[in-house]
Amino acid sequence: MKNLNYIRSVCALSLSAALVLPALAQEKDAKKSESSGGAPGPEMMAAMMEMAKVGENHKLLEQSAGNWSCIVKFWMSPDAPPTESTGSVVRRPMMGGRYFVSDHTGKMQMPGPDGKMTDFEFKGMAIEGYDNAKKKFVSSWVDNMGTGIMMSEGDYDAAAKAFTFRAEYEAMPGMKMKIREVITIADKNHQTMEWYEDRGGKEVKTMEIKYTRK
């Protein structure tokens, strides 16, 4: 019986320590923060400044800055011939080269309310960057064909000179679509974007854009 009481006492002390010690540590950290005016310490500030630096990955995005003309191919169905249209893109750096914003304009044929094809003026905008914390290229996209914001993350293959972004977009309620976007840098004046959609578990190419620097 004495052994049982002893074991219970030890367990109770261990549990108390597990509950109290973290609280004491948090209180100690809070007092340190109060003594420094609530500001992060030197080590934290140094780490934050390091994360905010513009690096080689941002320079990879910089090569796409400028004015571009583009030829767009769009497949409504994989077994049907694509429709073609033209457009233009203006891409510029912002916030010291940490991000790049691009404005996309063009005209294309789209089905109207009566089902007949009609001219449609397309407008879109992207913000691209490299997240030093995530170690990923990041992108957001909006256009006048929806009201959502598509967020994507990607990587760069130096051997292929290509960025690959992946995203999941919900164009209609409950209808989420996985997307893969590949941007290949042919040279400083030519790029190609290929757009793939997951349709019923099968990846299908639905768009291709060829960019030429103006």
Image (cartoon, grey):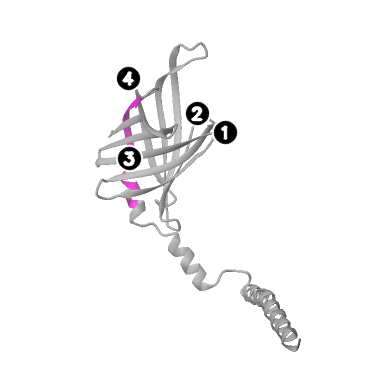
Quarter of the rendering occupied by the N terminus: bottom right
Q: Helix, strand, or loop for circle 2? A: loop
Packing grade of label 4 (10 A; few <14, some 14-19, many >=20) is: few
Q: Helix, strand, or loop for circle 4? A: loop
Picture residue at 32% right of the left edge, 19% below the top: 81
Q: Earlier in the sequence, mark 4 or mark 1?
A: 4
Packing grade of label 1 (10 A; few <14, some 14-19, many >=20) is: few
Name the front one of labels 4 and 2.
Answer: 4
Quarter where residue 26 is shown: bottom right
Q: Which residue is mark 2?
A: 144
Q: Which residue is mark 3?
A: 183
Q: Earlier in the sequence, mark 4 or mark 3?
A: 4
Magenta-colored span: 59-74
Q: Earlier in the sequence, mark 2 or mark 1?
A: 2
Q: How many marks?
A: 4
| 154 is higher (above) or lower (below) than 69 | below
